[in-house]
Image (cartoon, rainbow, N blue to C red):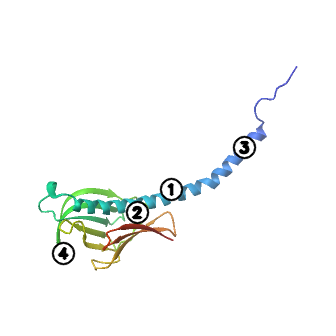
Amino acid sequence: MKQYNNGFTLVELLVTISIVMLLMVVAIPNFSKYRNLNDLGNAAKLIQSEIYKARSLALAPATDKNPLTNSYGIFITKDASNNYTMTVQELNYIDAAHITKYQKLDEINVSKNIRITCDGAGDCFSAIFSIEGYGKITYIKSATSSGVDILDFPIQITSNKVSGISKKIITNKVTEQVSIKTVQ
């Protein structure tokens, strides 16, 4: 009688399973770091997008706008629990001391793993784009400059889960460009 050896032996199965487990042990930490770096990049792109959105709204025709609105602003705020919120709002801007906020057009909660450079609770970053100035930045404030007239206004963001790497979103007041740079 012929005997057929179909299938795998127990030793072959154990060797295969141990190789797969070894590969998983190596791959999972790298995947986690990649995901956290991706979250950091997405948060930077989201902030950049919201800055461009406020500027675009200021450039849009005035037909559907609130007659009291003369500017649009983006505000990044931090609450006492270290949660960050980004809002784009219609404004009546006279000067830094006289800002009337109207309707919120967009409100986004930033991921809990992301930290934004901020001085205590309150506003971390504000940028106001004027309608009369055809979308030019009228006022800008970041944690590193409180309304001072400087050329570049950086927003530094880091991840709670990835050390040594951060993203810097730089708004140039003259060129109106918003760029993202990786800082190590």
* Residue identified by numbered label 1: 35
Q: Do callouts 4 and 2 mark residues in contact (Cβ within 8 Å)?
A: no
Q: Nearer the viewer, mark 4 or mark 3?
A: 4
Label 2 to label 1, Cα distance in Å? 14 Å
Q: Do callouts 1 and 4 mark residues in contact (Cβ within 8 Å)?
A: no
* Residue identified by numbered label 2: 44
* Residue identified by numbered label 3: 16
Q: Nearer the viewer, residue 83 or 86?
A: 86
Quadrant housing residue 95: bottom left
Disc 3 residue type?
Thr
Crowding near the residue tagged with mark 4, few <14, some 14–19, many ≥20 C-alpha atoms within 10 Å: few
Query: Could you say where residue 4 lies in the image, as x and y percent from the top left?
Result: 82, 26
Label 3 to label 2, Cα distance in Å? 42 Å
Q: Do callouts 4 and 3 mark residues in contact (Cβ within 8 Å)?
A: no
Crowding near the residue tagged with mark 1, few <14, some 14–19, many ≥20 C-alpha atoms within 10 Å: few
Q: Nearer the viewer, mark 4 or mark 2?
A: 2
Q: Earlier in the sequence, mark 2 or mark 1?
A: 1
- Most distant residue in the top direction: 1
**Relative vertical location of residue 129 with respect to residue 23 in this rendering, above or below:** below
Q: Nearer the viewer, mark 3 or mark 2?
A: 2
Q: Nearer the viewer, mark 3 or mark 1?
A: 1
* Residue identified by numbered label 4: 97
Label 3 to label 1, Cα distance in Å? 28 Å
